[in-house]
Amino acid sequence: MNLARRNVVIGLSTLAAGTGVIGGSGGFNSVEADRSFEIHVSGDASALLGLEATNDTIAGMEPSVAGGNDTVYFAIKDAEVNGDAAVNENAVTEFFDAFSVTNNGNPDINLSIDLPESINGVAFTLASERGATGPTDLASETYELTSGGSISVDLRIDTTSGGYVEPTSGNSYQFTIRGVSV
């Protein structure tokens, strides 16, 4: 076999292989398969994103019901109705170390808090930045929490003009603590 014939054979082989790739791979557009999976549920303190109430003035742990998980709750109620502490009108009230968040998972996460659009005047700030100008507010910013890391969060409620407004009677505000892998 001479050199020119060898180049032609190699060229044709390359062209045939390239045509196969361009023409189609025999792949598929969609597939459906049944697989089993398990989701393990853990209490707030030992879950992938661990939560712990650390300021018993406003936060606590509600025991589980019928094998469920304990729940962290926050309650700032009307003192006249419930006999509990309430925040002042036309004031800024801060609760230091309201709760802690621990990243019990393996990847680092971006931590944030989603508040309902109807709520104003509430901030969840990093306790480590207390007293700093413009501390990180988890309701409007994310914070990178390393694997195994833990932070303490302060709660700030501003009831001055245009600030926090109580929910209607019998209702409460709910927020979501979100941890997204970095």
Image (cartoon, grey):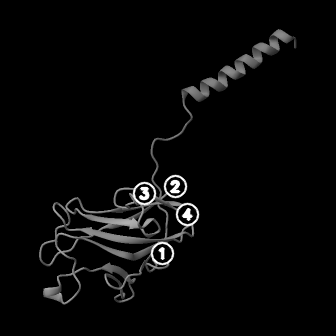
The residue where tag 4 is placed is: 146
Dot 2 or dot 3: first in sequence order is 3
The x and y percentages for residue 83 are 19, 90
Find the distance from the CA under tag 1 to the CA under tag 2.
18 Å
Whether tag 4 and tag 2 are in contact, CB under 8 A, the answer is no
Foreground label between 2 and 3: 3
Label 1 environment density (alpha carbons within 10 Å; few <14, some 14–19, many ≥20): some
Q: Is residue 172 above or below residue 67?
A: above
Identify the residue position indicated by label 2 in the image.
Answer: 182
Q: Position of residue 152 (x, y in %)?
A: 45, 72
Which amino acid, by three-letter code, is at mark 1? Ala
Question: What separation in Å lies between label 4 and label 2 (alpha carbons)?
Answer: 9 Å
| Label 3: few (<14), some (14–19) or many (≥20) C-alpha neighbours in 10 Å | some
Report the residue at 17% width, 88% height from top: 82
> Mark 3 to mark 4: distance in Å?
13 Å
Residue 4 x %, y % = 82, 9
